Image (spheres, rainbow, N blue to C red):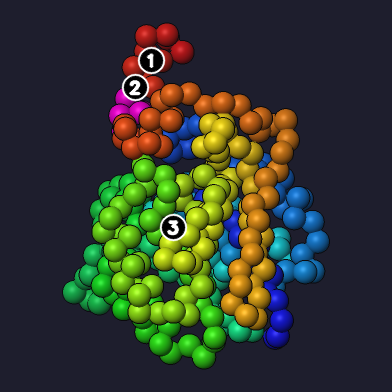
Amino acid sequence: MTGTVRILQLSDTHFLDDGIEAEGGGAYNTSEAFDAVFDHVGNHDHLDMVVVTGDVADHGSAAEYRKAADAFSRFQVPVNVCPGNHDFDAAFNAGMARIGVSTSRVIEVGAWAFLFVDSSAGTMLGQENGLHIDPPGQTRLHSNGSLGAREAAWIHQMCQTTNAEHVFVWLHHPPQPTIPMCRDDAYAAEWHDILDAHAKIRGFGGGHTHIPIDYELMDRPVFVSPSLKNNFSMEPQTWLPPGYRTYEFGTDGSVNSEVQLVDDERWPRLPFGSLLSSLFQGEITFAELSEIIARRSNVTGA
Ligand SMILES: [Fe+2]
């Protein structure tokens, strides 16, 4: 293939099993949001691929991955998926195994090599039998980005080995995000080292924050996709409807991307309050926010 590569990115689809409460609350009906996004995309003929950057399932259950795989299978083009902090490794890999839906780690298209990074790899535990598994309990679910030595070494190896002229990284946790709540100096430092070593990395496509935005890190663009679970704008401070991103990758190494939001009366752009603002600014933790909400509902009897 030659010429411009066109990709559609979904992220943070957070599919939920029927009758199960979303983790953290405040969630849209993500199946309904997927249907709205799918209709909004329209014809797939112009697309080379669909990419999904993690938090595919809200609780990482097999039933949620079945829903997700059924939904992704509706695209007429290949769909490739990398995991987020909500995606437990074994369930994710088994659940995404379908014809047309895959979890490939590298895909070359034209002048581009696309790397699909597990930005939670640094939280995994090595076993005596050689497997690496998720840590027990909710550790992965509540973790920031962490590559760890193994994933970082793999990224170096791929950048050195690929024949492609340009490399683009798909991952869940964007490196050095602008939202104070999600900042993590150790994770940012891992990416600084990699970017220092590989000029052919042209940019990143991620999710995680549920705040669609783009910014630059060491002269590379970082594009953050909307989520299907809930979305927020920081200026003005409002909720946003669900959405996705479109990308055009040029043969010259250029990347253009646009946020697409599915405006609809089901998802009005209402202002959000000071509590959510404090969370995003890193002034309170997610656990503290949940405690405050629980206390208030006890007082009001809601
Ligand atoms: Fe998410």
- Amino acid carrying mark 1 in the image: Arg
Task: Please check the rendered image and state whether residue 291 is part of the magenta-colored stretch, yes or no.
Answer: yes
- Amino acid carrying mark 2 in the image: Ile
Q: How crowded is mark 1: few (under 14 residues within 10 Å), some or many (20 or more)?
A: few
Element class at badge 2 = helix
Q: In the image shown, does 55 or 8 lie closer to the viewer?
A: 8
Q: Can residue 226 be seen in this view?
A: yes
Task: Please check the rendered image and state whether residue 266 is part of the magenta-colored stretch, yes or no.
Answer: no
Q: In the image shown, does 204 or 289 lie closer to the viewer?
A: 204
Q: In the image shown, does 285 or 64 lie closer to the viewer?
A: 285
Q: Which residue is drawn at 35% across and 57% down?
A: 145
Marks 1,3: beta carbons within 8 A: no
Determine which of the numbered discs, if any, sits on residue 174 in the image.
3
Q: How crowded is mark 2: few (under 14 residues within 10 Å), some or many (20 or more)?
A: few
Determine which of the numbered discs, if any, sits on residue 1 in the image.
none
Q: State the CA–CA distance, disc 2 to disc 1.
A: 6 Å
Residue 41 lies left or right of residue 254; in this view the side is: right
According to the image, label 2 marks what residue? 292
Q: Give the range drawn in magenta.
A: 287-292
